[in-house]
Amino acid sequence: MRPMKYWLRGLVCAACLVSVPAMAQLRDISIPISSLSFGTAAIRIAKELGLFEKHGLNAKIIVMDNANSATTALISKSVEVVLSGPGELVAAQGRGQKVVAIANTYNGLSASLVLAKDVAEKTGVSPNAPVAERLKALNGLIIGSTSATSSYTVSFKGAAEAVGANIRFTYMAQPAMVAALEKGAIQGFIAGAPFWGVPVVRDKAVLWLSGPKAELPPQNLPASSVSLQTMQDFAAANPELMKSLAAVIADLGKAIEERPAEVKAAVAKLYPDVDAKTLDLLYASEAAAWKARPLTAADMAHEIAFVKSTGTSLPQIDSVDPASMLVK
């Protein structure tokens, strides 16, 4: 009879033979995102927690300048899946491009608008004044945002125009906004956490309007700031991949509910420059949004309505069934 150590070696080798093919079965997938803000953090947190691997995926996350660039890459078939906003999805559908949402990754609006401190003082309006007054004070100001079709731009543009204010938008990546504000190139900007917090903490800016606190009128707030998106034909040809991606996001929601300390540790690792006090503040407001609920046809109808309200040209949008904008 062979000594026990030989049987143990055989079991270890057998385990190796089983694990190597299992690892080799991970499907590679690249996912462009528009920034490293907290609004797009859900899939990065999911990756940090190993949730993609759990569902058979090896995700490579690529940072692009804005959501519009990510959607353009999707439409051109440079990538198969992107993380992008509802404005980009609606704009694509309105121009005949069948982009569909796979899974919601952030409830509501993740962006806040900050004004340079001296600009805020010159408006003569208090940061605690009624929302309508703060929106009117934005008339004629140069405000940075990520892109013309971003939910950030769509939300604030629509809300401002409803009270007669015309914002002068200029577009740039979120990391560039802080320097642009402090150099006086822009008078304010719209961004997600942690970007808007940097000049506020430095006492260079004032938080003017908060998206996560739902300070804008309901008709100007999206159901979702960002979602995983793909082309309709790709979704139809890859149903198992669609299920796996949706499962990753669902598992993140469970982790936030059941293992908050582990999730918070992952966030701290992803944002090492954010101090503990600021992280506590931001996590308290963002975690609920990351625990995103599934999108519905009613949500997509709402997204269409608020993008249309800005006057964006969407020649084919009225023929689009909101339910068809979701992966089935």
Image (cartoon, helix red, strand yellow):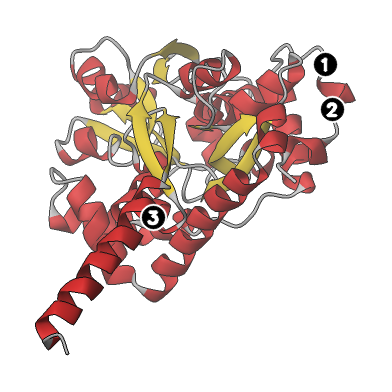
Residue topped by disc 2: 320
The residue that appears at 76% across and 32% down in the rendered structure is 305
CB contact under 8 Å: marks 3 and 2 = no
Is 204 or 8 nearer to us in this picture?
A: 8
The numbered mark, 3 or 2, whose residue comes first in the sequence reads: 3
The residue that appears at 64% across and 54% down in the rendered structure is 294
Residue 107 seen: no
The residue that appears at 23% across and 24% down in the rendered structure is 178
CB contact under 8 Å: marks 2 and 1 = yes
Instruction: Report the amino acid beneath label 3.
Output: Ala
Residue topped by disc 1: 316
Q: How many marks?
A: 3
- Classed neighbour count for the residue bearing mark 1: other residues with Cα under 10 Å, few (<14), some (14–19), many (≥20): some
Residue 172 seen: yes
Instruction: Report the amino acid beneath label 2.
Output: Val
Secondary structure under tag 3 reads helix
| Residue 56, position as x, y percentages in the image | 45, 52
- Classed neighbour count for the residue bearing mark 2: other residues with Cα under 10 Å, few (<14), some (14–19), many (≥20): some
Q: Quadrant of residue 235?
A: top right
The quadrant the N terminus occupies is bottom left
Residue topped by disc 3: 22
Q: Nearer the viewer, mark 3 or mark 2?
A: 3
Is 234 or 179 nearer to us in this picture?
A: 234
Question: Is residue 30 found left or right of 216 in the rendered image?
Answer: left
| Residue 197, position as x, y percentages in the image | 26, 40
Question: Is residue 32 found left or right of 321 in the rendered image?
Answer: left
- Classed neighbour count for the residue bearing mark 3: other residues with Cα under 10 Å, few (<14), some (14–19), many (≥20): few
Q: Quadrant of residue 280?
A: bottom left
Q: What distance separates the C-alpha of mark 3 from that of mark 1? A: 45 Å
The numbered mark, 3 or 1, whose residue comes first in the sequence reads: 3
Instruction: Report the amino acid beneath label 1.
Output: Gln
